[in-house]
Each structure stands twice: as structure tokens, then as C-alpha cells.
Image: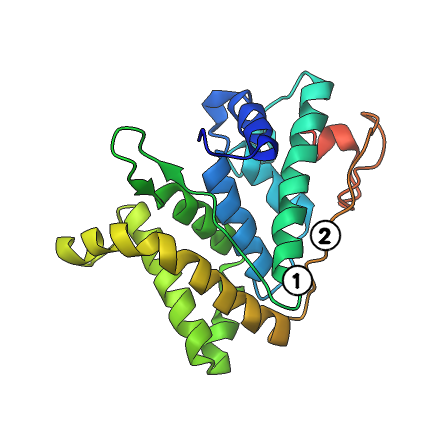
Amino acid sequence: MSRLPPRLRKLDRLLLNLPDDDGPMLVSELDGYLAGLLVCPDLVVPSQWLPQVWSRDDDEESQPVLDDMGHAQATIGAVMEHYNVVAKGLAVAKPTYTPVLDEDPRSDEVLWELWADGFGRAVDLKPSSWSAIDASGDEEARVALAGLLQLVAIARDEGTLPKEAVHAFDDTAPDLIPRWVLALNAWHLANATGVHAPISSFGKVGRNDPCPCSSGKKYKKCCVLN
């Protein structure tokens, strides 16, 4: 991750300092997750997706406790900042998207699997929503979604492709991922019902204040997960 810009290096450090037992996302996984959220046919609000960043456990009672309010707010702020960077890149007249992918320092091999798993976790939040793409008849978007879901299956060891085809993705996936994300984004801009607008910074929020994600819960019971 040494090639990351300062903003993402900071995000990387903050995520690495979260309670490890809960399985928090790493930067590449988070980037895939946010890309999936932003091209999802239906709007997904922060109160629905933020808890997955900290923990793989869907049980609200099992969510991690972040005792350090300063670290919690800094982490949420950094996550939202990256969300906004990706959202703005996809919302301009000529959308752009560059995935954050890990590299093996020994071989310089690009490791796309974490990104794909993150994208898959976004799909898992609203699995029925994605059928709208197939139903639309947009061949480019359908191919893009099928390709990304194939990468998700491979990353999770759930794929049915022969080994030769899986190995071929090691070379092609880094180029296919941004192309497919942009194809889904084009479909989203033309067809989706919800608009994924950039989210205002949470700023400094008190523990007992209403959570800025609009969930209706107190901050300490929602995004701060304390």
C-alpha cells in the first residue's frame, strides 16, 4: 500500500487500528464496497452500510465498541471523505474511477480479490435490487454486472470456472474492474431511482446527538458504534 496518496494512507492506518476481532474492512475492500454502493440501482443510506465497514457481524448487539471518540470520528470522517471522492468522480460529465488495489510486494502482482469481496458485500446489502439491471435489457450493464459477480465468486472461492480461466482474470481483472464499474455507473445515472449525492462531513458530533447519517438513532448507538 506504499503507493497510496496521503489521504488513503491515513484511511488505511485508521482502519488498521479498529478492533481486529470484528473483521473491519481494509482500504481495497472498502473501495470496492463503496463502488458497489454508488452503482447500486437503489439508494443505500449510511446507517445501512457503515456498520459493515467495522464488522462482518450483522447482529447489532455484536457490533464493535469504539471507546476512543476521537478515533471513531476520525475514521468515519476518512471513510466519508473517500466515499465523496468516489461519488464525485462517478457523477461528473465524463465519469472516472480508479480502483484501489493491493499489490504483492514480492512480485508486484496486483491483488484484486479484496476489492471484489468488498463489491460483493455491497451487492449483498440489497441483493434483489440488482435484478433491475438484467431486466432492463442493457447488454453492456448486464455483462459488467455478470463479470463483477464472477470476480466476487472467485474471490470467495465460490466460482465454477476452470483454473485456466481463473488465472486469466489475474491479468485482466485490474483493467476490467474500472471499465465494468463505469458501465454500471452509466446505467445507474440513466435508470436508478435514488441519487448517491456526496455526503456532508460529519464534523464534531456529541455522543448523545442525533446521528448525522439520518438513521434517527443517537450517534453513540449508530455510526460511532459505541
Q: Is residue 65 above or below residue 163?
A: above
As drawn, the label of residue 74 is none
The answer to which image quadrant residue 51 occupies is top right
Q: Is residue 81 above or below residue 164?
A: above
- Residue sitting at x 61%, y 75%: 191
Name the secondary structure under disc 2.
loop
As measured in the structure, the alpha-carbon distance from the residue carrying label 2 to the one carrying label 1 is 9 Å
Type of residue at label 1? Answer: Ala
Q: Which residue is mark 1?
A: 91
For residue 186, say whether it is visible: yes
Q: Total number of numbered labels?
A: 2
- The numbered mark, 2 or 1, whose residue comes first in the sequence reads 1
- Residue sitting at x 35%, y 63%: 147
Type of residue at label 2? Answer: Pro
Find the residue positioned furthest to the top: 68
Name the secondary structure under disc 1.
helix
For residue 226, say whether it is visible: no
- Residue sitting at x 42%, y 45%: 115
The answer to which image quadrant residue 43 occupies is bottom right
Tell me whether the residue at label 2 lies in contact with that at label 1, contact meaning CB atoms closer than 8 angstroms.
Answer: yes
Q: Which residue is mark 2?
A: 198
